[in-house]
Every structure is written in structure tokens, then in C-alpha cells.
């Protein structure tokens, strides 16, 4: 089936042709970047290479290059004010701190966990 170069293509010409569908396998580079990295310990248990922290206030993942983020550990005390050996850890991302919301967020979180009583006042 040859085509006359002086005649324009008609849609019927394309409809009569057989099409060839190729299925390709992923390249080694695609496989390398889409396969998650896994590490195993001596027992054969899978151990992640890096577990990112999450902001306690926003639940956002704190990236490794977020140099403004902080992690605070607040110790639990008994009724006499002595440290019990337990603590509660809070992580605040740089986004919250840059907006000036770190203090407010920490107050809200510690109130939720029972460390603080209500620190909000409605008086103006």
C-alpha cells in the first residue's frame, strides 16, 4: 500500500493501517530511583535509613535543611517537683517559629497533654 505524494492524506488511510504497541520495561535508572532504600540489621529486620521528625504543631515533616527547627524535651515531675525520669518531646518546625507562633503552639500542646492549665484569657 503506497501513498501518492501529490494526494493529501485522508483519515481512512490512517484507519486502515495496523498499529504496533510496544511495551517497554523500566530502565535501570528508573528502577534505582523508584525502589525505596532498605537497610537490614543482623537479625534481618528492616531498619529505615532516616526517620524524619514531624512538627508537633502542624504535623508537617521537618526537612533536614530546616535549620530553624527545634526539639524540646519537657521533664515530668511528681507532686513534690522532683523529676521522675520521664519526659515529653515536642518538635517545632522553622515555619511556626518564623511566624512567631512557637510560644503559642507550645502552650497549646502542653495544655493538651496536661502540663499547663488554661493559659488563655478573654480579658482585654
Image: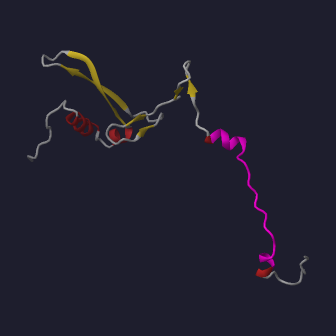
Please give the name of the residue rendered at 19% of the width and 30% of the height, measured from the top-left corner. Answer: 115
Q: Residue at left 61%, top 42%?
A: 34
Q: Residue at x 13, y 19 (%)?
A: 79
Image position, residue 32 (x, y; %): 66, 38
Q: Picture quarter containing residue 35?
A: top right
Task: Provide residue 120's location: percent of width, then percent of height.
Answer: 14, 41
Residue under the point 20% across and 35% down: 111
**Residue 23 painted magenta:** yes
Q: How is the image coloured?
A: secondary structure
Residue 97 against residue 89 in the figure, above or below: below
Which is more toward the observer, 55 or 96? 55
**What number of labels is visible?**
0
On screen, residue 8 versus residue 82, left or right, reads right
> For residue 81, which quarter of the picture?
top left
Up-down relation of residue 20 to residue 10 (above or below): above
Q: Quadrant of the N terminus?
A: bottom right
Nearest the viewer among 56 and 120 is 56
Residues drawn in magenta: 13-33
In this rendering, would 21 be left or right of 6?
Answer: left
Amino acid at each position: 500500500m503506497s501513498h501518492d505524494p501529490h494526494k493529501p492524506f485522508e483519515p481512512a488511510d490512517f484507519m486502515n493501517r495496523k498499529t504496533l504497541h510496544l511495551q517497554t520495561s523500566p530502565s535501570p535508572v528508573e528502577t534505582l530511583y523508584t525502589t525505596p532504600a532498605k537497610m537490614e540489621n543482623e537479625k534481618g529486620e528492616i531498619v529505615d535509613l532516616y526517620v524524619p521528625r514531624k512538627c508537633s504543631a502542624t504535623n508537617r515533616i521537618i526537612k533536614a535543611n530546616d535549620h530553624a527547627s527545634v526539639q524540646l524535651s519537657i521533664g515530668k515531675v511528681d507532686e513534690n517537683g522532683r523529676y521522675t525520669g520521664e519526659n515529653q518531646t515536642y518538635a517545632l518546625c522553622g515555619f511556626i517559629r518564623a511566624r512567631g507562633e512557637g510560644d503559642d503552639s507550645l502552650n497549646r500542646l502542653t495544655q493538651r497533654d496536661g502540663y499547663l492549665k488554661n493559659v488563655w484569657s478573654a480579658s482585654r
